[in-house]
Each structure stands twice: as C-alpha cells, then as structure tokens.
Amino acid sequence: MHSQSFEQVLCDFEGLIKNQIKKLRLTSYFDEYYQVGVVALWEAYRNFDPERGSFAAFALHTVRGHMLTMLRKEKRFGDHHVLHDEQQTTAYIDEQHSYHLDSSLFSSLTPYLSHLTEREQLWVVEAIIHDKKLGEIAREYGVSTNTVSSWRKQAIRKLRAVHLPVGV
C-alpha cells in the first residue's frame, strides 16, 4: 500500500468517506465528518498490513469506526450538557415557581437562597419545597439527572457553609 502516496489513496477512497457520511446520515455535518474520515483513512494507510487482508476492507472498517466513535462521543456530551439562556431560565423560574411559595416561607429561606446560584435555588425549591425527585426535575427542565445532582451537591455544600446569626 505504501507504494502509493497518501494523496493518491485519498483520491481513490474519497468516495468511501462520502458514502459512509451518507449511510450514517451525517450530511448536515459533512465537513466535520469528512475530516474525521480523512484522518481515519490516514491512520488506515499508516497501519495497513497486507498480510491481514485487503486495504479497501481495512479502510472501510477504520473510517466507519472513527465516525461511529465520534457520534458516540457527541451523543454522550449532548446527554450531559444542555445549553441554556440564563436570562430566559431566570424568567421561567421566576414566572413558574416564585408564586408557588407563600411569602412567609420564601422570606425565611431568602437568607439561605441568596448564597446559591439560580440553578441551585431551583433545586431547593423543586426538591425541598415541592418534594420532587431528581429525575422529575431533570425532565421538567430538559437536563440530565447528573446535572440536577450537581446542582444538589453544590447547594448542599454551600448551605452547610452558611453561618447565619441566630434569629435571622
């Protein structure tokens, strides 16, 4: 295989890369996955052993494998990270939940909640006041349970560190 330059191999197998992008229905991310395919083809070119079979089969296996690995990584990342507009979330939290708390309960929690981020406050209100489970909160706000769990951990850590004067 090393009798040909990589540029020639790329010209010969460019169709394989494009075909895999189509088969995996990744055409909306064509440029990104095309690059993954080129890198995978380069790896196949460097690591090919002619005694173990044909280069075409090895290239197909390597290119497809790299693309599937990239898809898995992106899915895993997407499952654990959700983008939010802070202003929109704040407004939603205020509109959706502040009216559920009676004023005496809310005023007694204010000194504690002021030490927390909005997301941590959301966890306190939903879990403690409304008695919701992590999974329910996660579904309601479109985030993973791990995300809600991290809000919980941070809120508890911060609340343990709060030392308010007696009578507040």
Image: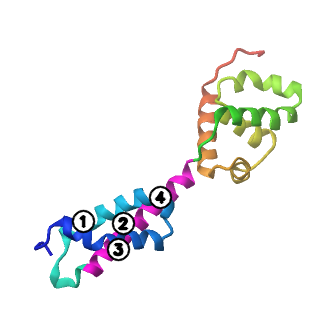
Q: Which residues are magenta?
A: 56-81
Q: Amino acid at mark 3?
A: Leu
Q: Is residue 44 visible?
A: no
Task: Tell which circle, 2 or 4, labels the residue nearer the N-terminal end.
Answer: 4
Element class at badge 3 = helix
> Which residue corresponds to mark 4?
29
Element class at badge 1 = helix
Q: Amino acid at mark 2?
A: His
For mark 4, does the 10 Å Cα neighbourhood hold few (<14), some (14 to 19), or many (20 or more) residues?
Answer: few
Q: Nearer the viewer, mark 3 or mark 1?
A: 3
> Residue, x 23% and y 83% (percent of image)?
54
Q: Nearer the viewer, mark 2 or mark 4?
A: 4
- Left-right relation of 137 to 68: right
Q: Residue furthest left?
A: 3
Q: CA distance from mark 3 to mark 2?
A: 13 Å
> Which residue corresponds to mark 1?
43
> Which residue corresponds to mark 3?
16
Q: CA distance from mark 3 to mark 1?
A: 15 Å
For mark 2, does the 10 Å Cα neighbourhood hold few (<14), some (14 to 19), or many (20 or more) residues?
Answer: some
